[in-house]
Structure formats: C-alpha cells, structure tokens
Amino acid sequence: MKPKVLISDSLSPAAVKIFEERGVDVDIKIGLKPEELEAIIANYSGLAIRSSTKVTSKILDAAKNLKVVGRAGIGVDNVDVPNATSRGVVVMNTPFGNSITTAEHAIAMMFALARQLPAANASTHAGKWEKSRFMGVEVTGKTLGIIGCGNIGSIVADRALGLKMKVIAFDPFLTPDRAAKLGVEKVELDQLFPRADFITLHTPLTDQTRGVVNAAALAKCKKGVYIINCARGGLVVEADLQAALESGQVAGAALDVFVEEPAKQHPLFGNEKLICTPHLGASTNEAQENVALQVAEQMSDFLLTGAVTNALNMPSISAEDAPKLRPYLKLAEQLGTFAGQITESSIASITIEYEGEIADLNTRPITNMIVMGLLRPSLDSINMVNAPVIAKERGIKISETKSNDGGDYNTLIRLKVEGAETIFTLAGTLFSGKPRLVAINNVVLEAELTPHMLFVRNKDKPGFIGRLGTALGEAKINIANFMLGRSQAGADAVCLVAVDGEIPASVREAVKALPGVVSAHALKFEG
C-alpha cells in the first residue's frame, strides 16, 4: 500500500509532482480548520505544512498513522515537537532553502528605512509632492551591525560589503578566521550597539537571545540608529522600541516579524518611523520553490526508504547501527550539552577522542550528536544532520581521533572545546550501558547527569563546601547528589551538584559571589 501525504498549506505544484513520481499518494486540502484537520489526519502517514497549519497535541492525538511532519521552511514553532517525538513522529524542516531570500528582504528593509520609501510613496500617491520632507541617508560608508552571523547573516554581510558599508558582527560561534573570510569585524554585543548606524538581527529566538534589543541596549546605541528584524519576533522588546522611536533615539525600524502573529493590531502600527511587512522574509517564488521541493524529497525518502534528512527529533542512523549506538548517542548528547551550557566565548575547534570499544563503531553520528548538543543551547532548529553544516558556517573545526586503548575504561569519549579565551575538556563512559561523566578539565570524578545541576569551578580552600551548601539551603534548593574533584590539594577544584528543581539566576549569582568561586553555571539535561 502506498504511503499517503496530506498537504495542508500552499506548496509549489512541483512538490506534488515529486511525491507522485516517487510513488506517494497526495491529497491537497488547504485552509482546514483545526477540527477539520483533526477529523481526517488519521488517514495519512505524512503531513506537509508551511507556517499556517498548527500541529498541536490535539492533532497528534488523532494522528494514529502519522509518521512524519515536513515543514517547508525553517521555523517549527507551529509544531509540538516534544509531543511528536514522544509519539514517534519525525519532524523535518528545510533549514537552508530560503536564506538568500530572507537576506535580500533585510537589505530591502534597510534601503526603505534609509530613504523613507513607504512614507514618500504614500505622500506622492496623495498628490502632495513633499520633496523637502523626505531627506534620507546614504548607506555607503555607514556601519552595519549584524547580530547573528550564520547562514543568513553572512549573506547579509556579503551584500552590505558590496554596498561599501563597514560590517561588524556579534555571534558567539563566529571565529576570527571565519570573520576574516567574510570580511567582517567580530565584536562583542556591547561594542556593536554604540558603533552601528544600522542593526539587523539574524539569530534564532532562544533563552539567550530573547529581548536582546531592549531599552538598555537601545540606550547604548547612537542617537538615530536604525533597527531591522527579519528573524524572529521576541528578539526585540516591542514596547522598548516604541519608546525609543518616540524619543528619537531610534530614527526608524523595520519589522518583518512580531511577538504575536498574525499581527493585525499593534501599538506600533501607524508610526511613520516604522516599516512593517507580514513575515515576508521567505516569500519569493524561488525560496518557496526550493523549500517545497526539499520537503517533498525528504518526506518521500523517509516514507519509502526510511532515510532521514534534516530531522529535528531523530538521529540519522541506519537500522543496523541503531542498537549499538543508542547508549553512546545519549552519552554524546550529554557531553555536548554540558560543554554548550558552560562555553561563554566563541568556539574555534572541537576535538573528540574515541578510545576503547567505541573506536570500532561508526562514530560519525556520535560526533554529530556531540556538536548538536554543544550548539543547541544557543541555536534552535539544530539536529544531527545540520549541526556539522552550521558548525562549518561558523568556522568551527571538528576533528576526531580513535584509539583501541581506553586506559582505565573499556570505552571512553573525551571532548575538548577550544575557544578564543578558554580550553575545556570533558570525558565520559558507559557504566552498565548508562552514561557517566568521569572527568572535567582533567579533574577526575564520577557523575550521572540529571535534569537540573549546578556546576562550580573553585579554588580548593577549607570551608567552601559549607558555604555552598548554606547558599543552596537558604534558597530552599534541595541537593540530590554532590560530586567533587580537584587537580591537587589547594589547586583547582570542580563541584557538580544535582538538585531537585531549576536553579534561579539569583541563586547562581549568589554562588558566583562566594569566596573562591571561579565560575558557576546552572545546567539542564533532558531525562
């Protein structure tokens, strides 16, 4: 029996042709109400969508035969990915099909701001001919600040350099070598705000980037700065932007995305200093054709052969290797996630050493899992397939070594992360098939990584453990386990504390202020 796919959002006819030529039956039902989709979804093994269809837990409850959801585009905010994962539904996206289109939209918005084109157009249509009213600014020679210099941001940088602009970029994962190749100056965020004449955002919405452009940031900017956001709503605090537009601190803003979409009513609407478009970043014929073809090919491959490409919730592993690699993949994810949560500077290289029994296995998916875990705290829409690509875009070098000698362990993974300012190492093994951390920066300790943990680096001095326990006790944080290690007496030490719940930022800051503490990080791991 042929697999059957439902296309519930508008896709290129070429995508339908790919499904049919590959032997997949297709139904096209666009504009379904949630209850209508819920009533029919059990008839399909695949669902192809864009941004309009909401794949909620209720839809997934009814999707008894659904195997894959394919999103023609990058963002999967409209898909309940955790719920899909728990039900064995693969969620795929097409992360690179609309990069040029989105970058061009940002450049178009910049020009529109610089020359006040929408207001001048409306005035001229009204027969006013207000030539002296619309005095613009040149972009030539101006400084463009790019927040997020990945795939899209690097294209924006290239176009801006062609316009003879000076380009500065903030991206924790942008290495100096990659910046030099792009022709941009890598800066810290606090340096970008006061130097930029135009600021454009090209970063995903994460806990670290949410509200990155806020009142404090805008106050650091030049008076008369221009703000452009074609990335994600929520990166800019909209109320703070409104106040800055009204005060004149911001000369103009261009928004393609909003916190709540569709944005049919908004306090910013009607402000002549604001240019807004209805999330058109990916809306060109070329981009829609690209992502539609990609999602059709990916879904067909999966449904017909089991091949997985650009999956957000499933590793790319053959059926033969899966049983052998599964425990190692969990260990790899934990090591990468640990390193990703404590790495604060840009990453230049990742070195992974496989020792003992693991050296005889296919380690490529394990490496991909480590890289995914490492980058995931700062990036969304990252998976085992695209993690190496994204790392390469940021100039991060990845290397592997293998040795059949595991030393004291039958099998061992050692991870070294090198950045502009730090070198950090972790080592892990399997104990009865379960992941165990066995070294941090060459300090030996044994720890099971639990959902909520506190990691502290400190000087090995008397009284530290008591002070740390008191600080956590006063914050009513219950300690589940306490692991310690040191390089030698009185030297560097590490402390890994398993706790029963999330650690508030205020508690982390209180721990950082304790005598002898070098750094403190609240860590989260999936169960």
Image: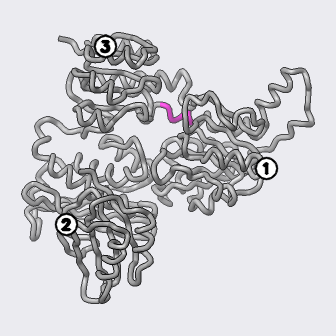
- Tell me the element at label 1: loop
The crowding category of the residue bearing disc 2, from other C-alpha atoms within 10 Å (few below 14, some 14 to 19, many at least 20), is some
In front of the other: 317 or 124 = 124
The amino acid beneath tag 3 is Ile
Residue 399, percent from left and from top: 29, 57
The amino acid beneath tag 2 is Ala
- For the record, the magenta segment spans 98-102
- Tell me the element at label 3: helix
Dot label at residue 447: 2
User: In this rendering, which labeled residue sits more in front, label 2 or label 3?
Assistant: 3
In front of the other: 464 or 159 = 464
The residue where tag 1 is placed is 248
- Is 187 drawn above or below residue 280 in the view shown? below
Residue 346, percent from left and from top: 45, 61
Q: Which residue is painted at 44% across and 63% down in the image?
A: 505
- Tell me the element at label 2: strand
The residue where tag 3 is placed is 40
User: In this rendering, which labeled residue sits more in front, label 1 or label 3?
Assistant: 3
Q: Separation of disc 1 and disc 3 at Cα?
A: 53 Å
In front of the other: 184 or 63 = 63
Label 1 vs 2, first from the N-terminus: 1
Judge left or right: residue 219 versus residue 305: right
